Amino acid sequence: MPKAPAFQFYAQDFLTGVMDLTMDERGLYITLLARQWAIFDQKGIPKKRLALLVGFEWDNLPEMVKEKFEDNGDYFFNSRLMESFKQLKSYKEKQRLNGQKGGRPKTQTITKKRSSLKIEDRSIKIEDRKKKIEVEVKVEAVKPYQTENFDLAWDNWKEYKRLELGFNYKTIHSEQAALTQLGNKTTSEQHAIDSINNAMAKGWKGIYPEKQLTNGSKKNNKNGQQYSDEFLQEVVTGLQPF
């Protein structure tokens, strides 16, 4: 097999790998790599000629340099460079066998294959666009109070409904309606959170906020009497909860 004149040199990998080496050791290392590739032999570099190449016997090489190579008895080699050598040899062998079979396929056949690949690629792109659109149109319900405390309370309410009552909001529209109704019947974020906690504590299917005046007190009837929670629950029994 003809020798390849060069191998891939990854500058960043090399600089990282020789950070602990002195400049002299780096010179030895790159010289040995070049020698290994120039020999182009799966055994590696013969130790008997090493002194003529770099002025050191194998046993006298700096330990930091020796760690970069595998000791194979009468030979030594860098495993990463050896792997590159084997891959190149395998590729050239495949090219040689293809040449014996008549070379590459005719241009017409290649054109047909490329056309089919373009169609497949186009279908994949269309499918990806559909997925992207599905993600973009997915929205969340707008909450009447945009705070973390209310978000937590509402999530707790949905979890309570799911676990204890076996109920889930089937669509974003039903959840939005419930949130809108809660916002209309409460005077503040704290009023809404207290109403949610009260409903869960009493095992209700829905949230029934107590009416409050602007100063935060509960609203009484015309005679000044305040209704109990139990009475209010009886009044709303049978109504559609939210």
Image (tube, helix red, strand yellow):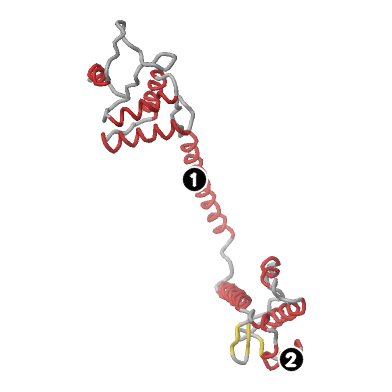
Inspect the image, locate mark 2, and give the three-letter code of the amino acid beneath it. Ala
Inspect the image, locate mark 1, and give the three-letter code of the amino acid beneath it. Ser
Is residue 85 shown above or below 195? below
Is residue 147 shown above or below 98? above
Among the 4 quarters of the image, the one containing residue 223: top left
**Side of 9 relative to 82 (left or right):** right
**Side of 79 relative to 51 (left or right):** left
Depth check: give the residue in front, 152 or 129.
152
Position in image of residue 126 (x %, y %): 50, 42
Depth check: give the residue in front, 171 or 199.
199
Position in image of residue 30 (x %, y %): 72, 77
Depth check: give the residue in front, 203 or 217.
217
- What residue is shown at x 34% (from left), y 19% (from top)? 210
| SS label for mark 1 | helix
Position in image of residue 213 (x %, y %): 40, 13
State the quadrant of the C terminus.
top left
Among the 4 quarters of the image, the one containing residue 2: bottom right
Are there few (<14), some (14-19), or many (20+) residues within 10 Å of tag 1? Answer: few
Is residue 19 shown above or below 34? above
| SS label for mark 2 | helix
- Residue located farthest toward the bottom when viewing the structure as drawn: 48
- What residue is shown at x 27% (from left), y 29% (from top)? 202
Are there few (<14), some (14-19), or many (20+) residues within 10 Å of tag 2? Answer: few
Q: CA distance from mark 1 to mark 2?
A: 62 Å
Depth check: give the residue in front, 179 or 85.
179
The number of numbered badges drawn on the structure is 2
Among the 4 quarters of the image, the one containing residue 52: bottom right
Position in image of residue 87 (x %, y %): 59, 74
Question: Can you tell which mark lies on residue 123?
Answer: 1
**Side of 19 relative to 211 (left or right):** right
Q: Mark 2 — residue?
A: 51
